Amino acid sequence: MYNLKRFNNVQILKYWHVQMCSISSIILIVLFPFSLYSQNSSDTTKQKLIPLTVEGYIDTYFSFDFNEPENSIRPYSVSYTRHNEFNINLAYVSLKYASENVKAVFTPGFGTYMNANYATERVTLKNIVEAYVSVKLFRNKNIWLDAGVIPSPYTNETAIALDQICYSRSFAPEYTPYYLTGAKLSLPLSEKVTFYTYLLNGWQVIEDVNSPLALGTQLDFKPSANFSFTWNTYLGNEKSVYVPNYKMRYFTDAYFTWNKRDRWIFTGCAYAGLQEKRNIQNETTSYGWYQGNIATRFKLNKKNSISARVEYYSDYNNIMITPVTNASGFDTYSGCLGYNLSIAEQVMFRVEGKYLFSNQKVFEKSNLSVNNNTVLLAGINARFK
């Protein structure tokens, strides 16, 4: 059984987190007035406005879970949650405005992904995929400040299936934030390296449910057009009315993407998290979870390709996942193999088989606990402007 030991220098990490939050707050507060000053009225005549653009996206799917859940809801899934029926995973219409110094994005979404992933948000917030404003802080420097509901930097997968190597999602993005709420500062360090810092309401929430604010960072390295490497961190106090015994959460992930001659594409991701919890003796103990995955797609020709992924996910302390059975902890190996047909530009038909195997009986079939699960998934993804 896997269990991370408690950090000996956790007090130092807490102090660093508070200081970094304070420093980031000061940076945002100090730079923002300068950005307003740099955008004086004389510049407005020089700005060439880009028209408002509208983008649409639909991911329609059919999934069949061979364990046949009685309530037709596939366990442990945020994406493609419905069993044995045709449905919409995610559909949205995105409004995008851009000028020389200001950008804005508003994207309401619908589908079973939204129902599962936004279940804890208030009614008026349940349909927000993205909603943020970006301001260029300096006229001659590519430094931007974003504020609102913004995309998450964590893991090598997103909710947009059309942009993913495999059709299904791994456990990596399903149990890390798909979206964040707060402020993001983009700082280009060179042509190949960009640093981002985040002040956040918390771990995938729109409304703040705890305090103080959380801190996130991202370091993005792109040495060539064919290779990129990203390293992220998250530090935040996760105590709330929902989990009153939770304290600090520490999380880090790293992933890469490599495109070889436009024929092969590879991506891999690994992460680890540490959650502090206070027990009934008022003592603080730290519990960990981790995962790793690697995926690839091979182009047979211009329209046809094959994709595959393998993954291992471990959460023996039930920090992110509580088994639907009586198993004491959660872990699973998974593998998938899929076929992709490019019907037209930005339109793709996909079919995929996925097999999951656990060291414990964390799955259910015919009211019995089992250690494996097989899923068949097919769908069409389309993006249009």
Image: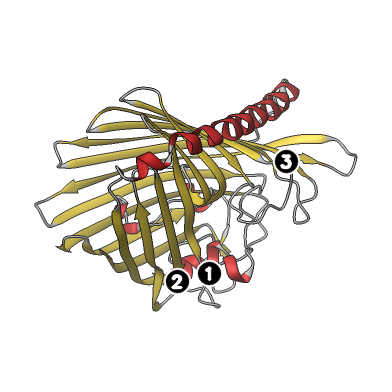
135 or 181: nearer the eye? 135
Identified by mark 3, the residue type is Pro
Q: Which residue is mark 1?
A: 115
Q: Nearer the viewer, residue 9 or 329?
A: 9
Q: Which residue is mark 3?
A: 212
> In terms of image quadrants, where is residue 7?
top right
Image height check: is 241 above or below 384?
Answer: above
Indicate how the structure is coloured in the image: secondary structure
Quadrant for residue 186, please give it.
Answer: top left
Residue 12 percent coordinates (x, y): 72, 21
The answer to whether mark 2 and mark 1 are in CB contact below 8 A is yes
* Residue 125, x across and y down, in percent: 58, 65
Going 54% across and 74% down the picture, which residue do you hit?
A: 366
Q: Residue at x 49, y 57 (%)?
A: 131
Marks 1 and 3: CB-CB under 8 Å? no
Instruction: State left or right for residue 369 relative to residue 254.
Output: right
- Can you tell which mark lies on residue 230? none
Q: Is residue 79 visible?
A: yes
Q: Secondary structure at mark 2?
A: loop
Describe the element under mark 3 as helix, strand or loop.
loop
User: Regarding mark 1 in the picture, which secondary structure is present there?
Assistant: helix
Estimate the x, y position of residue 80 in percent, counting from the top left: 43, 66
Q: Which residue is mark 2?
A: 111
Which amino acid, mark 1? Asn
Q: Residue furthest front?
A: 42
Q: Give how far apart the Cα atoms at labels 2 and 3 are.
A: 32 Å
Q: Residues within 10 Å of mark 1 (few under 14, many from 20)?
A: some
Name the residue rendered at 54%, 66% in the picture.
Answer: 116
> Residue, x 14% and y 42% (percent of image)?
263
